[in-house]
Amino acid sequence: STPLYSSAASDVYKRQVHAGQAAYTPFTLSLYDKAVLGVSCRWLWRCPASRLLGHYQANITDNHLDVGVGSGYFLDKVRFPSSSPRLALMDLNTDSLAFCARRVARYQPDVLQRNVLTPIDFDGPRFDSLAMNLLFHCLPGSLPEKVVALDHLLPLLNPGARVFGATLLQGDVSRSLPAKGLMSLYNAKGIFSNRDDSVVALREALASRLDDVHVEVQGCAGLFHGRVRKTLP
Protein backbone atom coordinates (compact mmCIF):
# COMPACT_ATOMS: atom_id res chain seq x y z
CA SER A 1 0.00 0.00 0.00
CA THR A 2 1.00 3.66 -0.38
CA PRO A 3 3.01 4.95 2.59
CA LEU A 4 1.57 7.85 4.54
CA TYR A 5 4.70 9.86 3.74
CA SER A 6 6.81 9.62 0.62
CA SER A 7 10.44 8.68 1.15
CA ALA A 8 11.51 12.02 -0.35
CA ALA A 9 9.57 14.11 2.15
CA SER A 10 11.72 16.07 4.58
CA ASP A 11 11.41 15.81 8.35
CA VAL A 12 10.10 19.39 8.41
CA TYR A 13 7.45 18.56 5.84
CA LYS A 14 6.43 15.47 7.80
CA ARG A 15 6.02 17.57 10.93
CA GLN A 16 3.92 20.11 9.00
CA VAL A 17 1.62 17.41 7.65
CA HIS A 18 1.27 15.92 11.12
CA ALA A 19 0.59 19.28 12.78
CA GLY A 20 -2.26 20.07 10.41
CA GLN A 21 -4.27 17.11 11.62
CA ALA A 22 -2.89 16.41 15.10
CA ALA A 23 -5.32 18.82 16.80
CA TYR A 24 -8.17 16.41 16.12
CA THR A 25 -8.27 14.17 19.18
CA PRO A 26 -11.31 12.41 20.70
CA PHE A 27 -11.61 15.30 23.19
CA THR A 28 -11.37 18.13 20.67
CA LEU A 29 -13.70 16.30 18.27
CA SER A 30 -16.33 16.13 21.02
CA LEU A 31 -16.18 19.94 21.18
CA TYR A 32 -15.78 20.57 17.46
CA ASP A 33 -19.40 21.25 16.54
CA LYS A 34 -19.91 23.90 19.18
CA ALA A 35 -16.43 25.42 19.33
CA VAL A 36 -15.40 25.40 15.66
CA LEU A 37 -18.69 25.33 13.76
CA GLY A 38 -20.78 27.16 16.32
CA VAL A 39 -18.31 29.86 17.41
CA SER A 40 -15.31 30.18 15.09
CA CYS A 41 -17.11 29.66 11.79
CA ARG A 42 -20.01 31.92 12.66
CA TRP A 43 -18.37 34.74 14.62
CA LEU A 44 -14.72 34.76 13.50
CA TRP A 45 -14.64 33.33 9.99
CA ARG A 46 -18.12 34.74 9.22
CA CYS A 47 -19.15 31.59 7.41
CA PRO A 48 -21.78 29.82 9.55
CA ALA A 49 -22.23 26.06 9.51
CA SER A 50 -25.67 26.53 7.92
CA ARG A 51 -23.99 28.06 4.86
CA LEU A 52 -21.52 25.19 4.63
CA LEU A 53 -24.33 22.65 5.05
CA GLY A 54 -26.25 24.31 2.23
CA HIS A 55 -23.15 23.97 0.05
CA TYR A 56 -23.04 20.27 0.88
CA GLN A 57 -26.72 19.88 0.09
CA ALA A 58 -26.33 21.51 -3.32
CA ASN A 59 -23.44 19.31 -4.42
CA ILE A 60 -23.51 15.91 -2.73
CA THR A 61 -24.49 12.69 -4.53
CA ASP A 62 -25.37 9.22 -3.29
CA ASN A 63 -21.93 7.97 -4.40
CA HIS A 64 -19.73 10.20 -2.27
CA LEU A 65 -16.14 10.47 -1.04
CA ASP A 66 -15.49 12.80 1.91
CA VAL A 67 -11.90 13.86 2.52
CA GLY A 68 -10.86 15.60 5.73
CA VAL A 69 -13.91 14.44 7.64
CA GLY A 70 -13.62 16.43 10.89
CA SER A 71 -16.42 15.50 13.27
CA GLY A 72 -18.75 14.28 10.53
CA TYR A 73 -21.24 17.08 11.27
CA PHE A 74 -22.13 17.79 7.65
CA LEU A 75 -22.43 14.14 6.62
CA ASP A 76 -24.72 13.60 9.60
CA LYS A 77 -26.96 16.56 8.74
CA VAL A 78 -27.07 16.48 4.94
CA ARG A 79 -29.89 14.74 3.07
CA PHE A 80 -28.48 12.28 0.57
CA PRO A 81 -30.40 11.77 -2.68
CA SER A 82 -31.13 8.18 -1.61
CA SER A 83 -31.62 6.44 1.72
CA SER A 84 -28.70 4.08 1.16
CA PRO A 85 -25.82 6.09 -0.31
CA ARG A 86 -22.36 4.74 -0.96
CA LEU A 87 -20.13 6.74 1.36
CA ALA A 88 -16.38 6.65 1.90
CA LEU A 89 -14.44 8.59 4.54
CA MET A 90 -10.80 9.51 3.93
CA ASP A 91 -8.44 11.18 6.38
CA LEU A 92 -4.93 10.85 7.78
CA ASN A 93 -6.22 11.14 11.35
CA THR A 94 -7.56 7.87 12.77
CA ASP A 95 -9.45 9.66 15.57
CA SER A 96 -11.39 11.75 13.05
CA LEU A 97 -12.14 8.69 10.97
CA ALA A 98 -13.42 6.71 13.97
CA PHE A 99 -15.47 9.63 15.32
CA CYS A 100 -17.09 10.35 11.96
CA ALA A 101 -17.68 6.67 11.15
CA ARG A 102 -19.60 6.19 14.40
CA ARG A 103 -21.67 9.28 13.70
CA VAL A 104 -22.74 8.12 10.24
CA ALA A 105 -22.71 4.38 10.97
CA ARG A 106 -26.22 4.14 9.51
CA TYR A 107 -24.65 4.53 6.05
CA GLN A 108 -22.04 1.79 6.64
CA PRO A 109 -19.20 3.97 5.33
CA ASP A 110 -15.89 2.69 4.01
CA VAL A 111 -13.03 4.08 6.10
CA LEU A 112 -9.75 4.93 4.36
CA GLN A 113 -6.70 6.23 6.19
CA ARG A 114 -4.70 8.05 3.54
CA ASN A 115 -2.41 11.04 3.16
CA VAL A 116 -3.80 12.95 0.17
CA LEU A 117 -0.44 14.66 -0.42
CA THR A 118 0.94 11.37 -1.71
CA PRO A 119 -0.47 9.10 -4.45
CA ILE A 120 -3.50 7.21 -3.13
CA ASP A 121 -3.80 3.44 -3.14
CA PHE A 122 -7.45 2.65 -3.98
CA ASP A 123 -8.93 0.11 -6.39
CA GLY A 124 -12.67 0.41 -5.72
CA PRO A 125 -15.39 1.89 -7.96
CA ARG A 126 -15.13 5.60 -8.70
CA PHE A 127 -17.19 8.27 -6.96
CA ASP A 128 -19.63 10.88 -8.27
CA SER A 129 -18.91 13.57 -5.68
CA LEU A 130 -15.96 14.61 -3.55
CA ALA A 131 -16.03 17.00 -0.59
CA MET A 132 -12.84 18.67 0.66
CA ASN A 133 -14.40 20.81 3.34
CA LEU A 134 -12.19 23.00 5.57
CA LEU A 135 -9.19 20.96 4.43
CA PHE A 136 -6.84 23.03 2.25
CA HIS A 137 -6.01 25.56 4.97
CA CYS A 138 -4.77 22.68 7.16
CA LEU A 139 -2.38 21.31 4.52
CA PRO A 140 1.21 22.59 4.38
CA GLY A 141 2.53 24.76 1.59
CA SER A 142 1.07 27.30 -0.81
CA LEU A 143 -2.21 26.66 -2.57
CA PRO A 144 -0.54 25.55 -5.82
CA GLU A 145 1.51 23.08 -3.77
CA LYS A 146 -1.27 21.62 -1.65
CA VAL A 147 -3.86 21.37 -4.41
CA VAL A 148 -1.70 18.44 -5.55
CA ALA A 149 -4.06 16.59 -3.20
CA LEU A 150 -6.73 16.99 -5.85
CA ASP A 151 -4.39 15.49 -8.46
CA HIS A 152 -4.18 12.39 -6.26
CA LEU A 153 -7.96 12.25 -5.79
CA LEU A 154 -9.10 12.83 -9.37
CA PRO A 155 -8.38 9.22 -10.44
CA LEU A 156 -10.91 8.10 -7.79
CA LEU A 157 -13.72 10.10 -9.44
CA ASN A 158 -15.96 9.53 -12.43
CA PRO A 159 -15.86 12.01 -15.33
CA GLY A 160 -18.32 14.79 -14.55
CA ALA A 161 -18.15 14.14 -10.80
CA ARG A 162 -18.81 17.10 -8.53
CA VAL A 163 -15.89 18.43 -6.47
CA PHE A 164 -16.71 20.91 -3.71
CA GLY A 165 -15.63 22.29 -0.38
CA ALA A 166 -14.50 25.37 1.50
CA THR A 167 -11.20 26.71 2.77
CA LEU A 168 -10.16 29.67 4.91
CA LEU A 169 -8.27 32.40 3.08
CA GLN A 170 -6.17 35.41 3.99
CA GLY A 171 -4.83 37.31 0.99
CA ASP A 172 -7.84 39.08 -0.50
CA VAL A 173 -10.71 38.58 1.94
CA SER A 174 -11.97 40.80 4.72
CA ARG A 175 -10.99 39.62 8.22
CA SER A 176 -11.72 41.11 11.61
CA LEU A 177 -8.92 41.71 14.11
CA PRO A 178 -9.91 38.62 16.16
CA ALA A 179 -9.95 36.52 12.98
CA LYS A 180 -6.49 37.78 12.02
CA GLY A 181 -5.20 37.04 15.51
CA LEU A 182 -6.54 33.50 15.66
CA MET A 183 -5.35 32.68 12.14
CA SER A 184 -1.89 33.98 13.06
CA LEU A 185 -1.83 31.79 16.17
CA TYR A 186 -3.01 28.70 14.26
CA ASN A 187 -0.40 29.28 11.56
CA ALA A 188 2.32 29.62 14.20
CA LYS A 189 1.25 26.31 15.74
CA GLY A 190 1.02 24.60 12.35
CA ILE A 191 -2.70 23.89 12.68
CA PHE A 192 -3.30 26.17 9.69
CA SER A 193 -0.99 26.86 6.77
CA ASN A 194 -2.82 29.56 4.83
CA ARG A 195 -0.71 32.72 5.08
CA ASP A 196 -0.48 33.04 1.30
CA ASP A 197 -3.85 31.56 0.36
CA SER A 198 -6.07 33.87 -1.69
CA VAL A 199 -9.24 33.75 -3.77
CA VAL A 200 -7.22 34.23 -6.96
CA ALA A 201 -4.81 31.40 -6.10
CA LEU A 202 -7.69 29.07 -5.18
CA ARG A 203 -9.60 29.81 -8.37
CA GLU A 204 -6.53 29.37 -10.57
CA ALA A 205 -5.51 26.09 -8.91
CA LEU A 206 -8.97 24.61 -9.29
CA ALA A 207 -9.59 25.92 -12.84
CA SER A 208 -6.38 24.24 -14.03
CA ARG A 209 -7.83 20.89 -12.96
CA LEU A 210 -11.65 21.11 -13.14
CA ASP A 211 -14.39 22.42 -15.39
CA ASP A 212 -17.18 24.82 -14.40
CA VAL A 213 -15.25 26.13 -11.40
CA HIS A 214 -17.05 28.59 -9.14
CA VAL A 215 -15.56 30.23 -6.04
CA GLU A 216 -17.71 32.31 -3.70
CA VAL A 217 -16.38 34.28 -0.74
CA GLN A 218 -18.32 34.05 2.51
CA GLY A 219 -16.50 35.91 5.26
CA CYS A 220 -12.93 34.56 5.25
CA ALA A 221 -13.95 31.34 3.52
CA GLY A 222 -13.79 30.47 -0.14
CA LEU A 223 -16.61 28.06 -1.04
CA PHE A 224 -15.88 26.26 -4.28
CA HIS A 225 -17.31 23.70 -6.63
CA GLY A 226 -16.45 22.32 -10.04
CA ARG A 227 -16.70 19.21 -12.18
CA VAL A 228 -14.19 16.55 -13.15
CA ARG A 229 -13.24 16.89 -16.80
CA LYS A 230 -14.68 14.33 -19.16
CA THR A 231 -11.17 13.30 -20.19
CA LEU A 232 -8.76 12.95 -17.31
CA PRO A 233 -5.04 13.68 -17.83
Image (tube, rainbow, N blue to C red):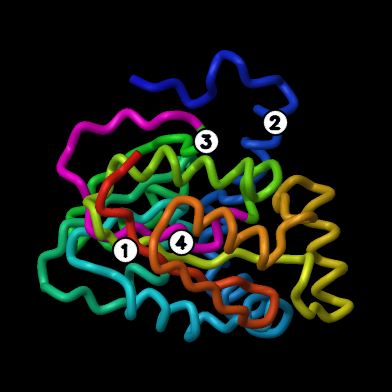
Q: Which residue is mark 1?
A: 162
Q: Give how far apart the Cα atoms at labels 3 and 1 are.
A: 20 Å
Q: Give how far apart the Cα atoms at labels 4 and 3 are.
A: 21 Å
Against 154, residue 178 (above or below) is below
Label 2 sits on what residue type?
Arg
Asked if the residue at tag 4 contacts the one at tag 1, i.e. Cβ–Cβ closer than 8 Å, the answer is no
The mark nearer the N terminus, 4 or 3, is: 4
Tell me where residue 2 sits by quadrant. Answer: top left
Against 120, residue 146 (above or below) is below
Confirm whether the magenta stretch covers residue 192.
no
Quadrant into which the C terminus falls: top left
Label 1 sits on what residue type?
Arg
Q: Position of residue 79 (x, y in %)?
A: 25, 79
Against 168, residue 42 (above or below) is below
**Bounds of the magenta span?**
118-136
Q: Give how far apart the Cα atoms at labels 2 and 1 are.
A: 32 Å
How many C-alpha atoms fall within 10 Å of the one at disc 1: few (<14), some, or many (≥20)? Answer: many
Which-is-in-front pick, marks 3 and 1?
A: 1
Asked if the residue at tag 2 contacts the one at tag 4, i.e. Cβ–Cβ closer than 8 Å, the answer is no
The numbered disc on residue 117 is 3
The mark nearer the N terminus, 2 or 1, is: 2
The mark nearer the N terminus, 2 or 3, is: 2
The mark nearer the N terminus, 4 or 2, is: 2
Which-is-in-front pick, marks 2 and 3?
A: 3
Q: Which residue is mark 2?
A: 15
Residue 81 lies left or right of residue 132; in this view the side is left
Asked if the residue at tag 1 contacts the one at tag 3, i.e. Cβ–Cβ closer than 8 Å, the answer is no
The numbered disc on residue 71 is 4
